[in-house]
Amino acid sequence: MNLYDKKRERCFTMEAVRESHPFDPMFPLVYFHHMKGNPDEDVSFYHFHDWYEAVFVHEGGGTFFIDKDFYPMKKNDLYLIPGDIIHQANPDSRDPFICSVILFHPGLIQSLELGEFYSHLSPFSLQAPFYSLTESQMGEFSSLLEKIQQEMTGKPAGYRHGVLSILHWLLLLVSRLQPVLPENSGKRSKSEAWMKEVLLYIDLHYTDSRLSLPVLAEQALVSTEHFSRVFKRVTGFTLPSYLGVKRLFKAKELLSQTDHPVSYISDVCGYKSTSYFHSKFKEQLGCTPGDFRRRNRG
C-alpha cells in the first residue's frame, strides 16, 4: 500500500467525506505523482475539501463527476476544481486512468498587482472545469509536474519556494488555455442524461427537509431501489451523502455571510433539528457552527 492509499484509507468512507491530508500549515500543498485509479477498490474516490485541486490525466480513462456534470476522462485531460465542490473520479475497468494531482489552499497563491488584471486562481471556474490538452501542451505540463516531484522528494534547499514558483508558472499557462464547456465534453450515457435532470432538481430543492429517496424516485417515475442503484452507480454517491454535503455547503455560506441565528440556518438548510445540524456540522468540519462563524467573519 503506497502513501496515497494509506492517506485515502484514513480519509474515505462509503459516504462523501471532507478530505484531509497531513501538511505543514506554513506550506498548505499536497502532491500525488502518477497516481493510478483502481476500479476493483470497494471505496470510490469521491470527496470534498476547501482546497483547490488540479488533476492531469497522463494515461487511461474513466469518468469524472464534478458538481452536477459528468466528464469522460481521457489521456491529456486537465480538470480544475475549486473548494467545496463535490467530485469523484471513476477509473475505467479496462484502462484505468493514471493522473497527477496538485492540492493546495488558495491562501498559498498570491498574485501581485503589476498593472494588469490577473489572478492565478482565475482558471478555477465551474463554468469551465475541463481542458483538453494537446500532446505538446501535456508534455510541457508533465515536465513541470516532474520538477515538482523532484523538489518534493529531494527537498533541496528552498524546495518549497521552488514548488511554489513552478505552480505559479503552471497556473499561468493554464490561464492561457481554452477550456471545453460541459456541453462539449462528450456524449452522455442514458443513465447519465437521466441523472443530470435529477441533479438539477435536487439543486433546486435540496434545502427542503422533505426531500428524500421516495420523493425523488416518484418524481423520476422509478422504484426507490432502481433510483438508489442508478444514483450510486452514476454519481458514486449515496443520496443521503450527496444531500448532506449540499446542505452543509449552504450552511457554511449562510454562517459566513449572514447574521441569521444558527437555528434559522439549520431550518432553511433542511436539517431535521438544530441539534442534528450541530452534530453533522462538527462531524464533517471538526468544529461547531458557532466556531465556524467566528473564524470566518471579518
Image: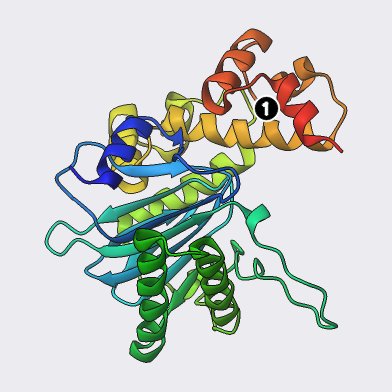
Q: Residue at x 34, y 35 (%)?
A: 227
Q: Is residue 223 in sight in this rendering?
A: no
Tell me where residue 202 sits by quadrant: top right
- When the figure is inspected, residue 125 is found, relative to residue 298, above or below; the finding is below
Q: Is residue 140 in sight in this rendering?
A: yes
Q: Residue at x 42, y 34 (%)?
A: 16
Image quadrant in which the N terminus is located: top left
> Residue 30: where, in percent of width, then height?
45, 52
> Mark 1 sits on what residue?
269
Question: In the rendered view, how is the structure colored?
Answer: rainbow
Tell me where residue 41 sits by quadrant: top left
- Label 1: how many Cα within 10 Å (few below 14, some 14–19, many 20+): many
> Residue 162: where, in percent of width, then height?
52, 69
Relative placement, left or right, of 95 versus 294 is left
Relative placement, left or right, of 103 versus 238 is right
Give the number of marks.
1
Label 1 sits on a secondary structure element that is: loop
- When the figure is inspected, residue 153 is found, relative to residue 232, above or below; the finding is below
Which residue extends farthest left? 94
| Residue toward you, 190 or 89 | 89
Relative placement, left or right, of 118 versus 21 is right
Which residue extends farthest front? 157
Which residue extends farthest bottom? 136
Q: Residue at x 32, y 66 (%)?
A: 73
> Residue 56: where, in percent of width, then height?
38, 68
Name the residue type under label 1: Cys
Q: Residue at x 39, y 72 (%)?
A: 145
- When the figure is inspected, residue 267 is found, relative to residue 140, above or below; the finding is above
> Residue 167: where, in percent of width, then height?
53, 70
Image quadrant in which the C terminus is located: top right
Tell me where residue 281 sits by quadrant: top right
